[in-house]
Image: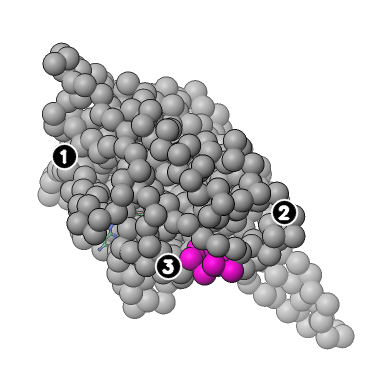
Amino acid sequence: MNAPIAASRLTIPFPTDTALIGGAWRAADGGALLTLEDPSDGSELARIARGGAADIDAAVAAARAALEGAWGRTSALERARILSAIGRKVLDNVELLAALEVHDVGKPLKQARADAVALARYFEFYGGCCDKVHGETLPFAAGYTALTLREPHGVTGHIVPWNYPMQIVGRSVGAALAMGNACVLKPAEEACLTVLAFARIAIDAGLPAGALNVVPGLGEEAGAALSAHPGIDHLSFTGSVATGARVQTAAAANAVPVTLELGGKSPQIVFADADLDAALPFLVNAGIQNAGQTCSAASRILVERPVYEAVRARMAERYRALRVGPASMDLDLGPVISQRQKVVIEHYLGLARDDGLHIAAEGSIVDGAPRGGHYVRPALIDDVPADHALAQEEIFGPVQVLIAFDGEAEALAIANGTKYGLVAGVWTRDGARQMRMARALRCGQVFINNYGAGGGIELPFGGVKHSGHGREKGFEALYGFSALKTIAIHHG
Ligand code: NAD
């Protein structure tokens, strides 16, 4: 028996138990706190503010005041400089942000660093966009000049999950600030240290008071209060389908527009003519990255029958080499976020066993991994019927199913045959088939002979069906975070 691995300790260089409202860090109304856990060993990591309706009220008022004050008067060029400065300061703090994420989310160090760099990149990208979004003049009736203006919505609400806090804050808050909105951000109660650190970085970089307000707290308290707040002009929600529906229902009472970035059951489709050497790393990595807790995880691998055995054998070989352990060890996988999430994943693995499905291969947990950590062995499940729960439902863990198909039509029917439509990957050398598949797949992004394009901050992202609606990332997000005003001048 190997000695237990000692949990590495983290020193957090700022107070974590306050909310940011109107440029000041203050305790939640009533002083209530929540505890964050380190998923690698189950120990207490930090206490955060448990914001509620009164804090959301104060944050919305502070955002409104910012719009009527210094932030509302910034020119596009000034916003460009502020956002670019935030991007640079985030880059200066990559190591701190990565260390926080390792302990808060249980993310292996390499991935945590990549997320911090992506956060910077969002601010670099949107910093460069601020002064390049404009309206148009419109050909119209004689005696008129007609034009459009792109204006901020006003106060934007942002509710984000725990799995990629930095990337999701970057893409939604970055685009909203670029268009001149003032933001109220509700991070997830399971993990939000990098969001709190980011807010400090943004203020240090010169973001005016009230342009960004952060109220940590529970979904059913701070989150629900934000979704139902009449002072919000736009809501961006990223999370589960069930919560998204609740948020949209609450926002509907105030006729507030909502962007929903929800779950997925995304396929990668491997045709017999594919370059398997190129495909293999993408097939596995897109399923196990962040321990499978990724909205765009490729949780279904559809393989044309002539190469099914070869793909299964090669994926199984890779699975058997996968190692799971404390995030600070920077292995292939860290723990999953919580005991609750582990129980959900184990439920699906139990279902696979009960229904006689064959587990083609599993990874292993390192000896001595702390007992309090939430470790799950990644599992590749063989020959799963396309209508089975494991092939239909989002598991949000390191579980991939293999499904065999014959020909293009069946591949499409299976790929489109879930309630989700977020991302799809297609592996084939046939150019005409690439185009046919790309057009026929019902989802928001299609990747041909790659998967995810390295995160692709420039590429609009979002879903159809239960994966949500609206687009974030890329230039497209700037349209979502602004309102178009039409002006017609009669001058005779
Ligand atoms: P979740 O829906 O439980 O929580 C997401 C956020 O909503 C958290 O901040 C939570 O506090 C808040 N919330 C919870 N109840 C609320 C309520 N009643 N009103 C308002 N807010 C409330 O989701 P999760 O488990 O944290 O995240 C996992 C889900 O997120 C998965 O389904 C995953 O696919 C999805 N996700 C989607 C994307 C995307 O871009 N499409 C990205 C990441 C995660």
Q: Which-is-in-front pick, marks 3 and 2?
A: 2
Q: Is mark 1 within 8 Å of ligand 1?
A: no
For marks 1 and 3, give the CA distance: 36 Å
**Going 30% across and 66% down the picture, which residue do you hit?**
242
Which residue in the protein does label 1 denote? 35
Which residue in the protein does label 2 denote? 430
Disc 1 vs disc 3: Cβ atoms closer than 8 Å? no
Q: SS of the residue at dot 1?
A: strand
Coordinates of residue 369 in the picture (x, y in percent):
20, 24
**Going 23% across and 35% down the picture, which residue do you hit?**
375
Which amino acid, by three-letter code, is at mark 2? Asp
Which residue in the protein does label 3 denote? 418
Disc 2 vs disc 1: Cβ atoms closer than 8 Å? no
Instruction: Based on the picture, tell me whether residue 411 belongs to the magenta stretch.
Output: yes
Coordinates of residue 222 in the picture (x, y in percent):
25, 56
Q: Quadrant of residue 146?
A: bottom right
**Going 46% across and 69% down the picture, which residue do you hit?**
417
Which amino acid, by three-letter code, is at mark 1? Thr
Coordinates of residue 349 in the picture (x, y in percent):
24, 50
Quadrant of the frame with the N terminus: top left
Q: Quadrant of residue 420?
A: bottom left
Local crowd size for mark 1, using a 10 Å CA cut-off: few (<14), some (14–19), many (≥20): some
Q: Is residue 199 left or right of residue 2?
A: right
Q: Quadrant of ligand 1?
A: bottom left
Disc marking residue 108: none
